[in-house]
Each structure stands twice: as structure tokens, then as C-alpha cells.
Image (cartoon, rainbow, N blue to C red):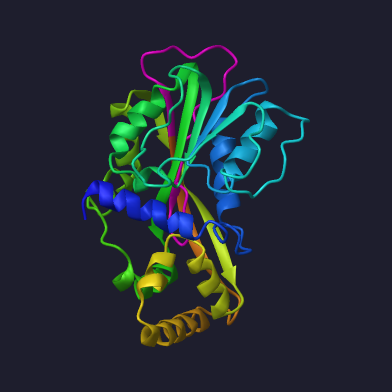
Amino acid sequence: MDFSSRTAAVAALFDRIADQYDNAGFPFFGPIARHLVDALRPLPGEAAADLGCGRGEVTSLLADAVTPGQRHGPRHQPCDGAARPRGVDRHRCPRRGGRRVGPALPPGSFDVVASSLVLFFLPDPPGALGRWVGLLRPGGRIGVTTFGAQSDLWQRLDGLLRPWMPPQDPRTAGPDSPFASDAGMEATLAAAGARDAVTQTFRVQVRFRRVEDWVRFTRSVGQRAAWDSMPEEEVERVTSAAAHLLGRSGRRMRCGRTCASRSAGGRPAQQQALPGRGRPGSGRNGWGQGLRH
């Protein structure tokens, strides 16, 4: 599958699950968003952009930080339908046709640029990151989150769905991709024009009381692609295998899936930091995986 077809397929998938995305009742995207925004340290009065905003977890936190004390409308709404909070520009990365891979935003106009679990979906992550760094004002900070190492249980559960997932692009997945290590992310940020790039790794734990919880969660994220392409006769087998794995994890029907996450961030390399600005955030975010921002 070529880049344009892959990006269009990703866009179509997330359009299809828009009503369920980040709406399955599990604290997954929220903790990831909180770590990213905490690392970026947005300040009152700063201009911020959330690229690939999903249902607005990062957007809401940024809005609370840059315009404290103001009402920003309902949380957990897709970007298409939510009112834009003051001080925060929300931008869908690839959606509806999937060809747009960079924000139509003015260069040098933001103090904070954030993007959570988006960069690896794009056809040219290094190029997109370079454009995002270009959005920053002097002293600005950029932070992105990606997945890191998975726990053993998470790997096994993901393995049940992998045969029906779309093929992974080796440039955004696998040991040689920039997302495979902290050093790879820091090097990619530096090549995009950021300086003082750092990464942080943290863990997110998702707890399922029953296998139906796992099914509901995986149907509400990118793994929905596997369920949609899975033959009907395989659904029961995969669900039974997942129930067996969850039951063996030691806390029957209350099994956690531990995720490490990383985030990575930095400042524009050609500009000097302004006094009083926050430190750059960095890291990777994840689920039963590591996440970076």
C-alpha cells in the first residue's frame, strides 16, 4: 500500500469510529494527554496548537492552561463538532480523504505545539515534524507522543488482532523506525530543527473487568481495523483467546494492561529561548506499550 492510500485508509477508519473513539470508558488517552501537556508547561496568555486533536483531551488541557478561568465548552467532542477554545488552535491532521499531512497554520505563530499519538500515522513523519517546528515562535516548545515498549500481556493481546491489521510501514514501525527508541525520536526532532530535544517515558495502565471490556476498547481505537476485516468465524476464537489471556494474568476479570509511554519535545533550533518560558517537554506515551512525548 502506497503512502497516499495508507493515509486515506487511516482517515477513513477514524471517520468510521469517530463516535466511539476515546469514548469506551477507559482512562487511556486522558493520562497520555496530561503527561504531554504537563511536560510542555503552557503558560497563561500563550498561543497553543493541538495537531490531530481527536476528541480534544489535549485541547481542553491546553485551553485550561493558556486561558485559565474561562469556560471552553464540552470536553470529549470530536474536533469537527466542538467549539474552539480561546487560545488553542485545533487541527485535524489527516482526515476526510487523508491527503493533508501538515497544518494550514501560519509559521512562527505559536508558543506551544502539541500532537498526541498522530505523527506515526502520517506518510512523512520527519517532514511533518519539520513543518510543526516551523509553527513555533522564539522560545516555543513542541511535544509529541508515540508508543513505546509494550508489556508482555499487551503484546499477546495485540498479537491476536495483528493478522487482520493493515500492513505496517517499516518507516513508521519496526526496529529501524524513528519511533523505536528515545534516541531515534530525539534525532528526528533535532533533524526537524528542534534543539534541547528530550524524551520521557511513563506507564499507563488500562484495567479490564471482563473480556468484553477489551473488545469494546479495541473496537474504539485503531485496532477496529482488525475487527472490521476479521471473518465472522474468527471473532469468537479471538475473543475466547483474549479471555484466556486476561484470566491467566493473575487478577481474574480485573486485569490491567500496563503501557509505557514516551513523549519527545524541544524548541526551534535557530531561536533563543525567551526568559520565563516553560521547559521543552519530551517523551513517548503508550498503553500496554510505551508512550513518548
- Within the image, what quadrant is residue 26 found in? bottom right
Could one spot residue 171 in this view of the protein?
A: no
**Viewed as shown, does residue 200 lie left or right of 28?**
left
Residue at figure coordinates x 53%, y 42% from the top left? 53
x then y, percent, for residue 201: 46, 46
x then y, percent, for residue 160: 37, 75
Vertical placement of 41 versus 158: above or below?
above
* Residue 277 highlighted magenta (yes or no): yes
- Within the image, what quadrant is residue 79 found in? top right
Q: Main secondary structure of the magenta part?
A: loop
- Within the image, what quadrant is residue 68 found in? top right
x then y, percent, for residue 223: 42, 65
* Residue 270 highlighted magenta (yes or no): yes
**Viewed as shown, does residue 179 lie left or right of 110?**
left
Magenta stretch bounds: 265-293
**Viewed as shown, does residue 169 lie left or right of 211?**
left
Vertical placement of 151 versus 292: above or below?
below
Residue at figure coordinates x 36%, y 14% from the top left? 270
